[in-house]
Each structure stands twice: as C-alpha cells, then as structure tokens.
Image (cartoon, rainbow, N blue to C red):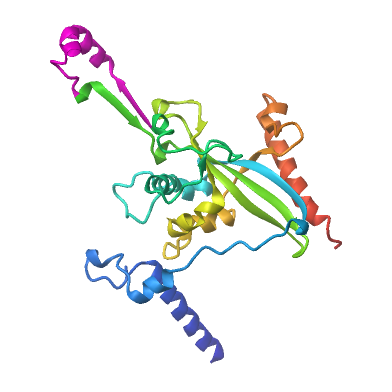
Amino acid sequence: MKLRNFLVVFFAVAGSYASFAQSNLLNAKTPEEIGKKTAAQMNADNDKPLPYGYVHDRDVLMGKTTCEIIDLDERVNFPLYFPVDTANIGKERRSLFDVLLKGIKTGKITEVYTDEYFNTKKTLKDMAFTFKFVDTTQAGVDEINTYYDDYKSGKKKLDAQYINVKELGAQDISGYKIKGYWYFDKRQGELKYRMLGICPISPEAKYAGEDNADVIDLFWIYFPSIRDVLHEAKAFNDKNSAMPFTFDHLLNARRFNGVIYREENVYGDRTIEEYMKDNSQMQLLESERVKEKIRNFEQDMWNY
C-alpha cells in the first residue's frame, strides 16, 4: 500500500512538471491557447540559473585553463545546432547561435570581444561585413557595362535581381570554441570546471555554403555574463520533450563533446596543432593526454 501511494504521488508530481514544460499544450482547447501560461505556471517558471559558489584563490589547489572545440557534426552536439530553419517551427525552439545573435542585437548581451582573452570589445557594427555579403552578379556586371553612361549619370538603377546577398545563419555554424578553467577545490575536495568564454565559428558570409571554406572566430562572449539569457532559452531534450534543457544547464553540465586544442603553457599558449603538425591522429592523442592529466590529478589525491 505504501509503495502504491508513493507511485501515485510520484506520477502526480511528474505530471505537474510536464504540464508546466508543455506550456498549456495538454489543456489548450484551441491552437491559440498553446503557450499561454497561467499565473501559477509563470510564477513557477520565474527561476534563475543556479549561482556559482564563491571560490577563494587559496582554495584552488590546482588550476588549468583549456580551450576546446565543439564539432556540430557530432550527434551528441546536435542540441546546440538545431533547429536551423525557424520558419516552420515554434518560436520557443531556437539554436544556440540564434539565441546569442538575438541577445547581441537586443542589447541583452554586451560582453562581446574579439578574442578569448577578452581584451578588445566588439560591436555588431564591427561584425557587419562578416554576417552579410552583398555583391553584383556577372549578369549585373554585364548590364552595367552595356548601359554604363546611364548608370553613371543615375538615370538607371541596378535591379535587385542583379544583386547577390548572402547572410550568415545558424545553418552555417560549424562549431563552437569554448574556454574554461579546470580547478581542484581543496575545501570541497573535488575537481570542478568553470566555463569562461564561448565563440561560434563559421566561414564568412562571402564563402557561406562553399565546400572546404576556411572558418573564422565570429566573436567571443564572456560566458558568466550571459547565463540569464541562456537560462531563458531551451534546448531540445530527445529523451523527454516535456522537460527541455536550458542552454545554461546544457553547457555547465558539459552535455556535449569537445576536443582540447590548447592548454595554457609557457610557450605563449601555443596550440596543439603548432607542435603536432600535419598529424591529426597525434593531435587527438595529445588532446586526450591533456584531458587525462587533468583528471588524474583528482584521482591521485585519494587512495583506494
């Protein structure tokens, strides 16, 4: 009987959480009511990201800064990439890049920089040429050459069909670079990770969609400053769509796969590629060696 009562209470609580996450989906009588929350639901959703605990410098027994790259072609990283087509999907479903770009455009995200050292700030105006490329097609060039005097005098204006406009979108993002700090907290006796920065990488808009195009760092964002924005945005949960993850939880819980491409070092923070040249297999092995070196510090603290 006690077990039965426990199961009844458990499923009742689980059902209540599911109804909150579905945003009135199960209670809506018309499609317009989907997404409209009651006052109780809005009050329940009025939460904040789990705050980081204070860590004194004296409590850090070991610390190491690493930079990783997240490849969006890997299945485990798909929640950061999809959806790329937002025309035929609910407004609550957006990719991480859309969330970051919207936050920059609306002014909610201000800590945007040119590199991972956060020295020089970067504005949306500075990135305009990266996100949008406007060029005249070959047919447009021929049109101008044919009626050169008319275009020069202003009698004719080039038709829109002769102008090629390419804009960078979520579908063009190939991955993310992240910067984080691994440290051993001697007060709590455990190894922890704190993300410091995130950077989407993609080709410039001029080369978007082309095969084997070189990718660049679009912008670096200081991660602790955007946790509220990421907490409001949801990533798809393949196990239970009624309980989506927040991007803040997904990144802080490291629910992704990343490959270390640099650790801070005495050689001016050189990358693994700089001293393991032209050998991808050795670069991956070196990345794993760096990762294991950090993990083994915690293992070596204890005797079993």
Query: Image check: 280 left or right of 149?
Result: right
Residue at (72% x, 36% y) in the render: 286
Residue at (20% x, 11% y) in the render: 152
Q: How many marks?
A: 0
Residue positioned most to the right: 303
Query: Image check: 33 left or right of 168?
Result: left
Residue positioned most to the left: 155
Q: Position of residue 57 (x, y in %)?
A: 74, 56
Query: Image check: 5 left or right of 274?
Result: left
11 vs 226, nearest the viewer: 226
Residue positioned most to the bottom: 1
Q: Position of residue 80 (x, y in %)?
A: 48, 48
Q: What span is in magenta?
A: 132-159
Any part of residue 206 in sight: yes
Q: Position of residue 36 (x, y in %)?
A: 29, 67
Quarter of the figure with residue 91: bottom left
296 vs 15, nearest the viewer: 296
Q: Position of residue 190 (x, y in %)?
A: 74, 61
30 vs 167, nearest the viewer: 167
Residue at (45% x, 65% y) in the render: 243
Residue at (40% x, 35% y) in the render: 125
**In which quadrant will I find the C terminus?**
bottom right
Q: Is residue 255 magenta?
A: no
Quarter of the figure with residue 136: top left
- On screen, 115 above or below 15? above
